[in-house]
Image: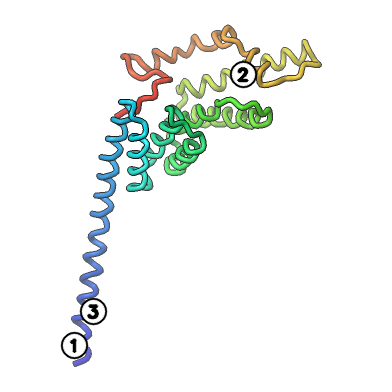
């Protein structure tokens, strides 16, 4: 009699467990749909200049789907490219996006742009310079035609040339961030840039230019 009473009880538990397990994918799917809808709202707010609303939407999308790399990437852009600028939040969001998709070229280019921000600390700038060169090489390995990667390496080669020239001509010259930026003149960059028409390559039909901050659909 005890065995007969226990069997139905076990079957009930198994049925409940089975139903719960079956419901998990549905719940996860619903969360992803919700995250995508919120993400779309955030993109629209971003395009219309409602940056605070966009930030909230991207944060909600990331919370609903913690593996949504695009939500973190767009959140990083809001905190880096708009009046809500907060470099720490932007860095943290982009780092999370890259943890999820480490070989996403768009995210890597965004990181490259972040590393270009000015620093009056000589050693910080030297570290960033090395990081940018390594990152540019990584980007070009994934996308050999990437204009941003080529530009960074080209600027680095020009910078190295002027350092070498000045070291020979003016051995006592002490380099500083300000003097190095003065050395890399627009005329020097123009020698490299004609082969990479960024505006025409990246915006063939009136599309986004390299400085366009509007999120894409």
Q: How many marks?
A: 3
What is the quadrant of the N terminus in the image? bottom left
Q: Is residue 24 above or below residue 176?
A: below
What is the quadrant of the C terminus in the image? top left
Location of mark 3 (residue): 10
Instruction: Tell me how far mark 2 sits from mark 1, CA to CA.
Output: 82 Å
Marks 3/1 in contact by CB < 8 Å: the verdict is no
Which residue is depicted at the point 24% across and 73% down? Answer: 14
Tell me if mark 2 has few (under 14), some (14-19) or many (20+) residues whose alpha carbon lies within 10 angstroms of its own: few
Image coords of residue 49 (percent x, y): 34, 26
Instruction: Tell me how far mark 3 sits from mark 1, CA to CA.
Output: 10 Å
Image coords of residue 201 (percent x, y): 40, 15
Location of mark 1 (residue): 4
Location of mark 2 (residue): 157
Q: Is residue 164 above or below residue 14?
A: above
- Mark 3 lies on a secondary structure that is helix
Which residue is depicted at the point 51% across and 34% down? Answer: 87
Tell me if mark 1 has few (under 14), some (14-19) or many (20+) residues whose alpha carbon lies within 10 angstroms of its own: few
Image coords of residue 96 (percent x, y): 45, 42
């Amino acid at each position: 009699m005890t065995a007969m009473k226990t069997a139905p009880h076990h079957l009930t538990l198994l049925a409940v467990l089975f139903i719960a397990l079956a419901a998990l994918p549905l719940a996860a799917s619903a969360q992803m749909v919700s995250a995508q809808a919120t993400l779309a709202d955030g993109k629209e707010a971003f395009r219309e200049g409602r940056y605070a609303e966009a930030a909230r939407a991207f944060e909600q999308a990331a919370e609903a789907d913690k593996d949504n790399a695009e939500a973190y990437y767009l959140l990083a852009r809001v905190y880096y490219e708009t009046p809500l600028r907060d470099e720490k939040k932007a860095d943290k969001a982009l780092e999370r996006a890259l943890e999820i998709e480490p070989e996403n070229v768009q995210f890597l280019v965004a990181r490259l742009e972040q590393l270009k921000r000015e620093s009056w600390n000589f050693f910080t700038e030297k570290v960033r310079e090395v990081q940018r060169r390594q990152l540019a090489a990584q980007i070009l390995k994934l996308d050999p035609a990437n204009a941003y990667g080529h530009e960074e390496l080209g600027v680095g080669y020009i910078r190295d040339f002027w350092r070498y020239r000045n070291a020979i001509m003016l051995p006592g010259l002490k380099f500083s961030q300000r003097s190095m930026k003065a050395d890399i003149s627009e005329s020097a960059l123009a020698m490299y840039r004609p082969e990479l028409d960024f505006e025409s390559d990246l915006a063939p039909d009136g599309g986004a230019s390299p400085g366009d901050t509007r999120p894409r659909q």
